[in-house]
Amino acid sequence: MIKGKKKKIKALVTKVGLDGHDRGAKVVASMLKEAGMEVIYLGMYQMPENIVKAALDEDVDVIGLSYLSGEHLIFTPLIVEEMKKNGLDNVLLVAGGTFPAEDIPIMEEMGIDKVFRAGSLTESFVEYIRDNVKE
Amino acid sequence: MTGKNNASEVNWDDYLKAYYEKPSSFKSWSGYDVKEIYTPEDSPDEKYEEKIADAGEYPFTRGIHANMFRGRLWTKREVVGIGSPADTHERLQYLVEQGGSGLNTIADVTYEMGLDADHPWAVNEVGLTGVNITSIKDMETLTKDIPLDKVSWSLITASTAASVTMAQYIAVAEDAGYQPAALRGSVQNDPIHFRYCGFRPASPLDLSIKLGSDVMEYCTRNLPKWYYTTVNMYDLREQGITAPQEVAFGFGIAMCYIDELIRRGLNIDEFAPRFTFYVSCHMDIFEEVAKIRAARRMWAKLMKEKYGAKDPRSMHFRFAVHTAGCSLIPQQPLNNIVRVAYEGLTAVLAGVQSLHCCSYDEPMCLPSEKAHLQALRTQQILAYETGVTNVADPLGGSYYVESLTDKMEEEVLKVMKRVEDVGGMEEAIRTEWLDHELESEAVERQKELDDGSKLVVGLNIFKEEEEKETPMGVQRVSPQSAKQQIEEVKELKRTRDMSKVRDAIKRIRDEAGEGKNTIPPMMEASRAFATTGEMLGTIRQVFGYSYDPMEIIESPFD
Amino acid sequence: MKKSKDIDEMIQQLFAGNRRAASRLITRVENETEDHHEIMKKIYPRTGQATIVGITGSGGAGKSTLTDHLIQKFREQGKTVGVIVVDPSSPFSGGALLGDRIRLQRHFLDDGVYIRSLASRGCLGGLSSATYNVIRILEAMGMDIIIVETLGAGQDEIDIIHIANTCILVATPGMGDDIQAMKAGIMEIADIIALNKSDLEGANRSLRQLQTALSVASLEEGQWAPRVIPTVSIGSRPEDLKGIDELASAITEHQEYLHTTRSIDKVKFERVEEELGLVFKDELQRLIFKGLRGTGKKRKYINSIIEGKNDPYSVVEEILNTYLIRKKKK
């Protein structure tokens, strides 16, 4: 924890790839804001490089990925790899969206800290982020 | 509490509380207060002929056909789109063998964006959520051995690429010896709404109206049995808006096309009989039935009074229902089967023409074969076991439903007035007013779940630890299929006769530039193996946009 | 707390243009960590040389899309660009939705562009002292141009003129009444006014109003005459855009004006004066409150004011007299 003024949690929320179902990402961004976080909303059509570059510039504490169309197993390793390359080892990585239960351990194995499925209540992901931001 | 039925652990205070429990809300899904009981005072019937009327009579509140399902059951369509065109073809045939009566294919995100399978940004996502059709060859594979003059094919393709899809489909059909006039089916073709589904770069407003109207005009003149658009209010509803907003925004978008077709010199009665809608059925049974009844009445009035339609068929609000995907959750997923059944029932009670029941696994993955079949069976149980097909508009005359229908109409009119106040639908879209409406409603829906003012079993009530397995298995898309599709596209681009492609592309460019209908030159170009991305990209350039909606690649024809 | 050795290393990396170092240092000054004074002291000598362009205007006026095009222009001139986008924090939750970065995304992968979003954190519509420090860090990083985009228009936003060498006010048609109200202050705010969305109805009328407002203002001999440039910053087609080149040239001309007339000295003086004042204020407050910590006096003072027994001015006077041993006025 950085001493000084009370530290704000800075989050980056983004869609990945071409899928444009952005309702969930937008709602999550709004809810994190209402929970007092500073949220960089990246929107749609973001490729792993873009996401990590933005996270780097903005020095965020957490990256939230929004998936819907089965692209999670393809993009997750690319993002994790890109994060490693840029030394973002202190950044919490969470994902939300539609996934079969079977994929959750796989995603965690790939490097996602926590997976939230569709239907998660705001409290669950806000609390998780508050309790787990690194540094 | 799962799996423990040891009596000593039962909390009897909780039991008592549950025994005396009352509903926590007396509001409809869209948030309107409803009364304890409705009486004749709530729906005086003196205006029956004028306001309600029998099914098959103007204003068609009770249905567009007098005998409704006795004339013909609804079309049972299950949406298919998975992996390569060949994979999709296989699943289609399976569902037809199982009694599905409509073929319904959906595009993947790359095709929806109008990208070829070999686009650098497409490689990761080809075939993930539907089928990619890059060239006429893919369309041939998809339709192989299917009698195109017998089946009713619904092409829920990418609305943005609907013009290309139609060109490819008609070209394939003609080449196989079918007359275009014999083709039956529908195409989603509502490019305007597609911007709200995440395909904004591919659907600038003017181009959406142009290409959407090209399809409508061409089909009106050449494919009399084809439903050339399904204006998609469903996808708007999925963003979290209310029932009246769904109808009002859908009507607003529909009118953008109608105004354009009239501007092109078509008579309203010439084209309106083939106009259709794609509607959501959400969890509030009565509100949804009332919404659809109100929509039927309002559409009839709108067509008659605003557009001067004379043919009653022009006044018919024809619609397909897709049960509400956003009402399904991954928690306790088998419950989704029950949700879908209620929603499907609602659609039938409301007089649906064509129905897609979501598979229970929609909030987790693409429909598995078992889940697909189960969804089809849900429709078949409705059709053959429940008796709901016997009588037209069985809820008509219910004090509650008639009163709620009036309420829906009143609320739709309010929303339409608001749209008018911001300058009409095109302006509402252009200024992103509509975006803000959709966003703020979506946040409201989340808050209702968070604070429990809207209850969903397994989500904010009766929660359990989540399952570790998907009950009927997970549908995966073989990466091999995608790879093969990409390779085939590359191979095609290497081996086709480029001079022919160039000529065909030039013709598209010239005719689009002259404001002509783009379907005929696109049919020719498809036959010369010009691809989806190439044809759309060329038209984009004519309209001053970048060749590639993602602005990654340049036109190979410049 | 980071060791000062780590901080020194980060600062060296910053001087070499390392974005990871820059972004971490920015977080530290933004959060006012205990070492942020040290950081600022060490980087200060490497600052002061960048051109700072302020872009202000009300929400939805198109600041971000104009910024996007300006970045492009500056990059074409071979200049590196730092961008700071300030958005308001919610007064209720303290959170903020920083969404403007989306509009700048075509520059994400350009190593010559560094973009940072800042929440206003209580400085409603204005700029916090942290903003000054963030600009300094981007200067130390070696950015040639620094664009500071802030919300708010008119009088509230005067802060920006203390920072920016060139200040652009983004107006839109239909804000005619606002323009009337702004007349008096408009010269002080903007060196250039971009009348954005100038393809909208009423744009000509607004253009005339703005030009009239500007023409009645009295200018001294040789003083920069603020100008209005009609722009269109949104359009999927290049030909939909308007006035971007003119806007970029106006910025260059204004810079030349500042340098040829030596007005730049005045601008720099004012910037440092403002900065000094802010640092003083913050530091003094911090020192005093630190001194009161644990004594229970702060609470007593506040309660006495609430109870009507005292007022803030008397309290401050009393505290200053006590702690700074100030000489009494005669």
Image (cartoon, grey):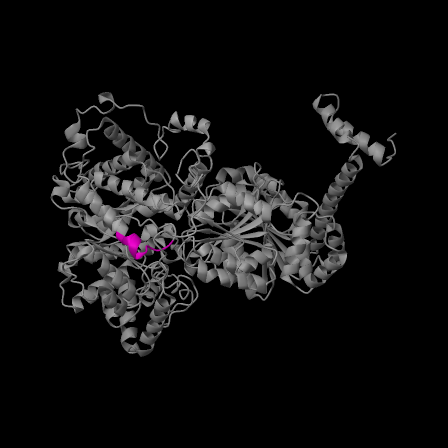
Q: Nearer the viewer, residue C24 or B436?
A: C24
Give the image location of residue C196, x and y in percent.
48, 49
The quarter of the picture where the C terminus of chain B appears is bottom left
Q: Nearer the viewer, residue B405 or B208?
A: B405
The quarter of the picture where the N terminus of chain B appears is top left
Give the image location of residue B339, x and y in percent.
32, 42
Observer able to see residue B478: yes
In this view, B349 is above or below C21: above
Observer able to see residue B210: no
Task: Decide if residue C61 is on the left or right side of residue C91.
Answer: left
Give the image location of residue A74, x and y in percent.
45, 62
Give the image location of residue B14, x and y in percent.
45, 29
Q: Could you say which quadrant of the image residue C297 lies in? A: top right
Q: Nearer the viewer, residue B9 or A54?
A: B9
Asked whether B233 falls inside the magenta stretch, the response is: no
Asked whether B369 falls inside the magenta stretch, the response is: yes
Please state the extent of the stretch shown in magenta in the rendering.
B365-373
Task: Decide if residue C156 is on the left or right side of residue C172.
Answer: right
Q: Nearer the viewer, residue B437 or A76?
A: A76
Q: Could you say which quadrant of the image residue C113 lies in? A: bottom right
Task: Decide if residue B242 is on the left or right side of residue B229.
Answer: right
In this view, A123 is above or below B35: below
Q: Which residue is painted at 56% across and 50% down in the image?
A: A11
User: How many numbered discs sit on the rendered protein?
Assistant: 0
